[in-house]
Amino acid sequence: MNNRLSYGNKAKNLEYVAKNTDIEIPYFKEIYLNELNNIENIVDSFSQKIMIRSNSSSEDKDYSSSAGKYLSIGPIEKTDLETIKKSWEMVINSYEEQDNQSVIFQNYIENAKSVSVLTSYKVGSDSAYRTFSTYYGSETDAITSGKYSEINNFFMHRSFDILPKKYEKYNVYLKIVTQLEDLFKNKQLDIEMVLDKNNSPQLLQVRPLMGKKLNKESIFEEKDVIDRNLKNYKKLNKTTADRFGTNQIYSNMSDMNPAEMIGKKPDNIAFGLYKFMFTDTTWNIQRGEFGYRKYSGGKLMELFNNVAYINVNHSLNSFLTRNLQKESCEEIINYQLNKLKENPHLHDSIEFDISRSSYVFDTVEEFSKEYKNIISPSEIIKWHNDLIQIDSQNKSTLEKNKKIILSTFSKLDKSFEYSKKENIKLIRDTMALPFTHHSRLGFVYFAQLNSLLEKEVISEDQKKLLLLSVNSISTKMKADAYEVKIGKKTLEGFLDVYGHIRAGNYNLLSSNLKNNLNFTESLINNSQQPLDDNILPKDIYTNIEKYFTINEIPLEASAWIDMFQEGISTRENSKFYYTKGIDGILNEVGEKNTSDRELFDLLDIEFNEENTSDKRLKNVLMPDLITSNEDFYFYEEMSKNGNYIGQGTVIGDVLLIENEANRPNNLENKIVVIPAADPGWDWIFNYKIKSLVTKYGGPNSHMAIRCAEHNIPAILGVGENNFTVISNSKSLKIDFSNEGFSNV
């Protein structure tokens, strides 16, 4: 180990490892053109199947790398000499002209348990995290090809060389990485390996990673700042007299869904506005007014390492009902928190799969199934009846808050001073608060619709018809855009109504329709003639009425359908009204060049490190769900297939729209891929797209309802790994019936 490797190709790299370590490497041999005449004798020394790997001299160097640029082919039966010769030629033809003319033959690992790619830092970023990507199967190109979505990613901060007990299964990978980093005296490596059927690591290749120079001093400076964030997290573990439960869990996709609404790493303005409008006080006021237990609460949203998180403990506590005994509340919350900890992938569907926050036509018997061993039967009955009582107030809640929000909306004219302190508070108290009520009602009716589907009261097609029957502001916007297109309405009139809509409701840099006329005109030119009004078939009413009668639910089908339609449409309309207030605030903040600190002063928010992003942490990685101290430095990326909306199969070209600034002029017949399910992306529905895919978004997100309403199949909340795979795909096949996707 006295000479540092001078990178040249894969074969030299592997020879160097074999000479200087005890790491196992599948038998390999560098093969040149003149050796092909003796191919039969050469392959005789190999196992039954071989891989033919690229070995370009320009692939791995000290100063550059072309990793993944050249072909590798296999496995090939060693007796299939013609295919071997042809594959050799194909690999060579993928090289550049000046490259060496050799390839690698390597034994194929039969029945491998897993294949992994290990890197010294997160590729494609400046994040100082060792990254272990593993596919549990024998396809050795599973990770590098990008064809497979079932890949587990594990990240560990470079300030650590020892794994905590909960992640000790990764020690087999860490040992290989650290051994090779020490060997090459180069802390930036890309390593491919498999675990064979005996769980023994087998190295396939190692190459340098370019573009990142890891600095030990800067890594530990970063750790110091992360430690301060961790200290704040520990401090927040303290509970209050009326807050039940012992675990302290934070999610970026539960309750008020910050990852979806303001982005995983929001800027100060977006975080401050969202915090002021919703997550400091409004969220808790809404729960009390809606009929849940009175709860002192606290801040619902926190900022850890620049990532916005929801306090799941607060959220679950706020949905407890008023007649439950304290002892029952403690048992319920602990059970729910532990269930989430054991099933972290449910963090973006907590209200569907963890909590019981709304009445979904369950009988007492159905309601009691999950909690029969948690709380007493009498408490279950009280809980069930409390939710029915809350549900009975839906109509009055809807009407009351509609009047409040419309009253303030009527005042938002050209003379309204949006950035005055009293007016910002007015928008919060008379627009944001009613919007949360209507948003809550939208959730309730969407949950009840899904309940009717699960109980087979209605079919999937009937659910689709019910959603298509909703006439919201989005439906009207599409119709009005088409009227402008055919000359029945003016562009000026259209902008007077819809000009405040922006992709990124809390993003100062996101332009609204009024300030982006080129895009607005494109949106109008691509608008489609609206479909005729959807008249619901009688059997939908009949089926629901029959179910209500049999289960003694004191509702009429026609009354429930009317409230369902109004509840869903009012949620969307209310969002439309409220966001005009936010658009006005952002416009004036921009015009006056208001600083972040000045805006925080207006919002009565302390401008400190707990409430603002830290540029020193711009490359820090954080999980979607925090359950322990260790998650600040080590975490597994959750396997998230996404929430599928729709049926059948869609095949089409992928169009990635990363932010508002790169909006294309035509989305027609594309599978559109966007980072979040933020309501500001509503303009997409003016195009005839094939499907929609988002990185973040839950089963009841704004976009879920919107896609269902417009009959657009979608996958919402696919997670970071799947989002990367899909974003890098040229075309995609999505099987909505079986919930899967693949490159085509």
Image: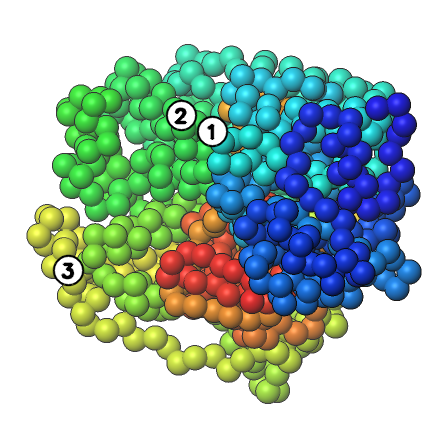
Under mark 3, the amino acid is Glu
Q: Is residue 671 above or below residue 669?
A: above
Q: Residues within 10 Å of mark 3 (few under 14, many from 20)?
A: some
Q: Residues within 10 Å of mark 2 (few under 14, many from 20)?
A: many
**Alpha-carbon distance for marks 1 and 3?**
37 Å
Q: Which residue is mark 3?
A: 545
Q: Are marks 1 and 2 in contact (CB under 8 Å)?
A: yes
User: How many numbered discs, if any?
Assistant: 3
**SS at mark 3?**
helix
Instruction: In the rendered view, tell whether residue 116 sits above or below residue 731.
Output: above
Pointer 1 or 2: first along the chain: 1
- Taking the spot 63% from the left edge, 47% from the top edge, the residue there is 45
Is 627 in front, or is 579?
Answer: 627
Residue at x 35% of width, y 39% of height:
353
Amino acid carrying mark 2 in the image: Leu
Give the image location of residue 664, x and y in percent: 70, 68
Residue drawn at 86 percent across, 52 percent down = 58
Which circle's residue, 3 or 2, is located before the other in the chain? 2
Q: Amino acid at mark 1?
A: Val
Which residue matches tag 1? Answer: 312
Q: 722 left or right of 510?
A: left
Q: Which residue is mark 2?
A: 337
